[in-house]
Image (spheres, rainbow, N blue to C red):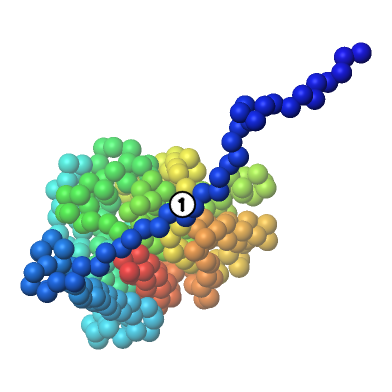
Amino acid sequence: MVRASTTSLPDHQKPPEAVPSQPIRRRTTVLRMPQDAVPAYLKPSSRTTVAPLPKAPPPPPAEPLPLLSVDALRARMGPGARDETMPPHTMSYTPMGARAFVSAGTGGPTVLFEAGLGHGKNAWGRIFNEISAISHTVAYDRAGYGQSELSKQPRDGLQILRELRALLQTEEIKPPYVLVGHSLGGTIVKLFAKTYPLEVAGVVLVDARHAEFSKRCKQLGVHRMWYEPPALLFAMASSATRAEMASAALTARQVRRAGEFPPVPLIVLSQDRTTSRWPERIGKVWDASQRNMAKMSRLGRMKIVGDSGHNIHHDQPDMVTTAILSVIAAARYAQAKNKS
């Protein structure tokens, strides 16, 4: 067995013991001399007082929102606003033919009227004059009506819309628009709103027909005499009216295939006089279709106008004026809110 060696080292080979270190003392010499004798680079720099930054001026007060009450808008109408006589018309020579139109009033949005089948700009009479006291207002004759020249083009909705936009561009009538349409005119303004949603500030439909109404009546087996114009009326109508009637089914398909309806104020006015005499089945279809039209926009609502037939704007013009003023007020509020 190997034993561990315990032999100690000689004294001269042992490492020296560690000597504890002493703290280092530094001597500071303070020089005292007159201030004038101190070199410039040793003198303390002078203090600079920084003034606080001025406060930003308060923002200017926001412009007040426009009057939104329908009663307030009505108060701005003069005594002559209820006149039935339309202002003199003007001829617009567009690339798609000569069109007669009436323009009156100032301020936005521009209210654009679209008459029903067989009618022109004069159908709006007193309503036009009342609205023109509040906002810029335009009504026109489609091709073949009033003073507008006939057109050899098809009379479907898209063609009518192209001709209307040619008039607006020729006369530099700029958006946004509040669209007001009666009957077939309602179908045309629906097509307008779906095709050019960014140009539309609101819509009023005056006893307009839903694009699916005739289709739904056929599915229920309702006789066509209840939902289509009689053959005698077709034979007696003007050439422009017959052409629009012949293209009505195509126009309805164009509306169904168009884009989404914009989220703008929408009021659907529906009659009650004729529908009360309809068979129960067709009456329910009509009522449901009118309510569905109001649902095209989240800002839409429906109003059944009492004691009125298909021509609500003749039977109850005040109701139509009130609906248009409501949409104008909502459109102006939205415009002012976006600017603020």
Image quadrant occupied by the C terminus: bottom left
The number of numbered discs placed on residues in the rendered structure image is 1
Where is residue 274, by image quadrant? bottom right
**Residue 208 placed where, x, y %?**
47, 58
**Residue 40 placed where, x, y %?**
10, 64
Figure check: 39 above or below 243: below
**127 vs 315, nearest the viewer:** 127
* Label 1 packing within 10 angstroms: few (<14), some (14-19), many (20+): many
Q: Amino acid at mark 1?
A: Phe
Q: Which residue is mark 1?
A: 261
Figure check: 117 above or below 46: above
Which residue does the image show at 45% across and 42% down from the upper left? Answer: 258
Which residue does the image show at 25% across and 86% down from the upper left? Answer: 79
Which residue does the image show at 43% across and 54% down from the upper left? Answer: 24
Let me know if residue 275 appears in the view.
yes
**Residue 322 placed where, x, y %?**
40, 76
The residue sitting at the top extreme is 1
Which residue does the image show at 69% across and 26% down from the upper left? Answer: 9
**Residue 111 placed where, x, y %?**
30, 64
Q: Callout 1: helix, strand or loop?
A: loop
196 left or right of 226 in image: left
Image quadrant occupied by the N terminus: top right
**46 vs 277, nearest the viewer:** 46
183 left or right of 64 in image: right
The residue sitting at the front extreme is 11
